[in-house]
Image (tube, helix red, strand yellow):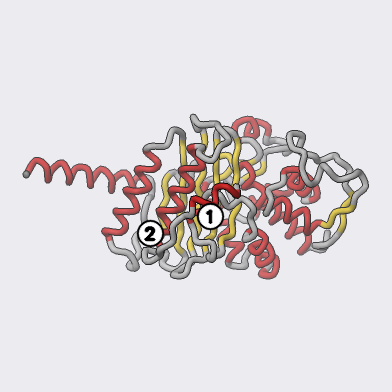
Amino acid sequence: MKTKKLIYLALFLLLTTSCSSTNAFKRSNSYTPKSHQKVIKQIQKLFYNFHGKAGLYVHNLATGETFAINADSLYPTASMIKVPIMVTLFNEMNEGKYTYNQQFVYDGKHDYPYDKDIINSEKIGTKVPLSQLIMLMISMSNNSAALWCQSIAGGGLAINHWLSTHGYKVLRMNSRTPGREQAYKKYGWGVTSPRELAELVTQIFKGKVVSKAASEEMYRTMSRSFWDGEAMSQIPYWVNVASKQGAVDQARSEVDFVNAPHGNYIFCIATKDQQDTSWTYNNAGYVLIRNVSKVLWQHFEPQSKYKFNPGRKKYW
């Protein structure tokens, strides 16, 4: 019996030490040590069983509770880079360069070559309002709209200038950006740490990005995501979530700001070097995102009875 107790003690110390080494938890008085240890173990187990590299940053704004695993490591943004594109556009509008409903003429020069979608199905000369381009880029994650928005925003250099002057050290646009060619080869369209992207979305929620009015419009736009099959599927449908998803062959990512009943919380999870490069519902990255979202919801809302309805799968 004494030997068994020593084994359990050793395992407990290993877990807590591992969490400390990754800056995993800052305790809040709103949660007991027991609940902390439970969620730590659950998330560590999910990460341990994942075949690839993954990072996570979580912050509960109501309690101050934060925890992170590899939250300052670099990961491909994939389509999450569309959030900084949107921010830069709103900054341009705030400075009077554009208006929200200003119309731009479609010329086909910014089409994403691998998709036949809403934008590149238009006829040359069609006028499209900037507001609709932003909606398509964020809500639908339309790549042609995003490339067009990137160009309107002034390109990658302008987007990265806004990021660097506002304190973001690693979140950057790579694609079609002079000087970022090597970063593009390694990370694709953009690169971030889970912490920095989560911080940007948090500042949008707080009304501190560009202006209070601009932040509100951006937050509302991010609250209308078409892609709700991963993290959002584990959160009750009646709870508002502002989100952006990203995916390429070897990486899956998502940032979600959850307006939970007992306190807003945000998390950003990102993967890279995945062994599973499939584009199916059961891709290992998607499964990890769903499972982490489920654990976090149950941790922050322990009285919730919500369970994912598997019948929804037929609508994805």
Mark 2, Cα crowd under 10 Å, few <14 / some 14-19 / many 20+, is: some
Q: Is residue 78 visible?
A: yes
Asked whether residue 20 is in view, the answer is no
Residue at 52% across / 51% down in the picture?
311
Q: Would residue 61 be found to the left or right of residue 251 on screen?
A: left
Q: Amino acid at mark 2?
A: His
Residue positioned 77% across, 51% down in the render: 153
Please report the residue visible at 42 percent of the width from the left and 56 percent of the height from the top.
Answer: 296
**Quarter assignment of residue 112:** top right
Task: Report the residue that reaches farthest toward the right.
Answer: 125
**Label whose residue precedes the other's in the sequence (1 or 2):** 1
Which three-letter amino acid code belongs to the residue tagged 1? Met
Between marks 1 and 2 in the image, the one whose residue lies nearer the viewer: 1
Where's the N terminus, which quadrant?
top left
Q: Residue furthest left?
A: 1
Location of mark 1 (residue): 232
Classify residue 97 by image quadrant: bottom right
Residue 225, quarter of the rendered image? bottom right
Q: Label for residue 299?
A: 2
Q: Nearer the viewer, residue 315 or 65?
A: 315
Q: Which of 23 and 218 lies nearest the eye of the viewer? A: 218
* Residue 259 locus on image (x, y percent): 52, 66
